[in-house]
Image: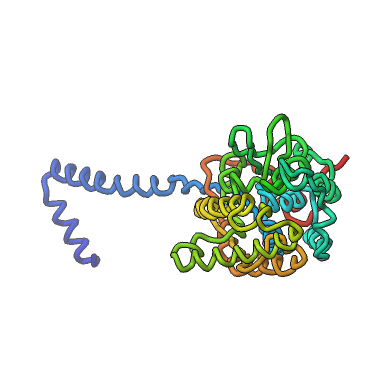
């Protein structure tokens, strides 16, 4: 407004009656007040509260598969090299053994050396302690247990600084057993007792056999018993996609038949084919095929429930092919590396309403972080 206009406006106001000038001034004051109040209010508004977050707890479910499950070592190697902290591990059969090695503080190099001990094809023969007559199984499994003791020791779950869950199956009442207390060695021995091959392992009155019967990839066990937020499943079991059509199922069946025949014919060549329990259509063959059918579907469902599934499946490989350990470990490493981007996304912080104290705070405490990383010796031993 120019000075001239302003003066004219003031002259006009002076010509108004006195009472009207007072009303006009009052209205002008009230019009100005809300703006002043608004300015004060904006200046005193509290800032938006910061969203609290915490690092997620990652669980690792290691499945069964005999020598093929040595691929778990390759997966653990990748997780170590990329600083992926693992809060808890659940393992079945060979996955139970490798999980126990992790929980007792073995480094990847030490695991590799243990696998290399089986490079001699006759190594399995040295672990044989046949049952005569073979009523409960072909082998007692006592030599296998002593072999496990050399690496695992006599540690208990309570003495571990890393969380470990070992899966087995109870023949008495058909339940899944999740070992999380007592002897780690006994639990691993039970989880590796292949039905029909190794005699059931009795623990506290329970007749325990291979965990792959009940939970071949123990995602569900981790969900139920471990305080984890996200789960990585590692499965070496044939995928459902391999048998989802008649043609694929036929190829898979023929491949498995060839593998079983080469193994059992070598091991039982002295028996008459009519008396060979592992021959096609006989008891061990039927048992093996039945287990395979159920494991494929249970493993498929388990992997679907995981936040991420790593599946280093080796087609045309023998479950007892321990002499080719490097092939399985390399396959696990390659498969995990191909998914490292997805694995790292699992580390995105989780929002929380109230501060959460993680035991330990793996984002700030370097010494505490080492306890949850593969390769640090943390197990308490007697």
Colour option used = rainbow
Q: Position of residue 332 (x, y in %)?
A: 66, 65
Q: Say which residue appears at 66% left-offset and 68% top-offset.
A: 331
Quarter of the picture containing the N terminus is: bottom left
The quadrant holding residue 279 is bottom right
Closer to us: 107 or 235: 235
Closer to us: 279 or 78: 279
Q: Where is residue 309 in the image (x, y as percent from the top left)?
A: 56, 58
Query: Is residue 211 visible to the viewer in this orientation of the structure?
Result: yes
Q: Say which residue appears at 19% left-offset and 64% top-offset.
A: 5
Q: Say which residue appears at 44% left-offset and 65% top-offset.
A: 246
Left or right, 173 with reference to 82: left
Q: Say which residue appears at 79% left-offset and 51% top-offset.
A: 105
Left or right, 264 with reference to 127: left
Closer to us: 289 or 276: 276
Quarter of the picture containing the C terminus is: top right
The quadrant holding residue 209 is top right
Q: How many labels does the image show?
A: 0
Q: Where is residue 282 in the image (x, y as percent from the top left)?
A: 61, 52
Query: Is residue 72 visible to the viewer in this orientation of the structure?
Result: no
Q: Where is residue 210 in the image (x, y as percent from the top left)?
A: 67, 46
Left or right, 126 with reference to 48: right
Against 316, is 162 above or below? above
Closer to us: 217 or 279: 279
Residue at the right extreme, as displayed? 382
The quadrant holding residue 131 is top right
């Amino acid at each position: 407004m120019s000075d001239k206009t302003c003066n004219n406006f003031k002259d006009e106001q002076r010509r108004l009656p006195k009472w009207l000038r007072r009303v006009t001034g009052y209205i002008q004051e009230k019009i100005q007040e809300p703006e002043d109040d608004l300015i004060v209010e904006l200046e005193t508004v509290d800032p938006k509260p910061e969203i609290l977050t915490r690092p997620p707890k990652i669980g690792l479910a290691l499945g069964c598969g005999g020598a093929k499950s040595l691929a778990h070592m390759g997966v653990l190697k990748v997780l170590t090299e990329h600083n992926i902290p693992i809060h808890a591990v659940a393992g079945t059969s060979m996955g139970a053994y490798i999980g126990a090695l992790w929980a007792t503080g073995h480094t990847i190099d030490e695991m590799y050396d243990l696998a290399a001990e089986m490079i001699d094809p006759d190594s399995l023969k040295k672990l044989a302690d046949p049952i005569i007559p073979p009523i409960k199984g072909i082998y007692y499994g006592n030599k296998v247990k002593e072999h496990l003791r050399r690496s695992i020791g006599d540690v208990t779950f309570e003495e571990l600084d890393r969380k470990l869950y070992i899966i087995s199956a109870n023949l008495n009442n058909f339940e899944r057993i999740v070992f999380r207390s007592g002897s780690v060695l006994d639990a691993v021995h039970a989880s590796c007792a292949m039905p029909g091959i190794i005699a059931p392992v009795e623990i506290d009155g329970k007749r325990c056999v291979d965990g792959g019967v009940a939970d071949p990839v123990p995602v569900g066990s981790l969900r139920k018993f471990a305080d984890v937020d996200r789960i990585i499943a590692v499965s070496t079991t044939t995928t459902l996609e391999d048998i989802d059509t008649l043609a694929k199922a036929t190829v898979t069946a023929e491949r498995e038949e060839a593998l079983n025949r080469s193994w059992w014919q070598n091991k039982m060549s002295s028996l008459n084919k009519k008396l060979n329990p592992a021959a096609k259509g006989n008891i061990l063959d039927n048992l093996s095929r039945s287990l395979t059918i159920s494991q494929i579907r249970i493993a498929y469902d388990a992997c679907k429930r995981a936040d991420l599934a790593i599946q280093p499946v080796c087609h045309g490989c023998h479950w007892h092919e321990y002499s080719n350990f490097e092939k399985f470990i390399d396959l696990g490493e390659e498969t995990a590396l191909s998914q490292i981007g997805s694995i790292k996304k699992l580390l995105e912080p989780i929002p929380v309403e109230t501060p959460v104290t993680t035991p330990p705070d793996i984002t700030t405490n370097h010494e505490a972080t080492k306890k949850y990383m593969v390769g640090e010796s943390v197990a308490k031993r007697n």
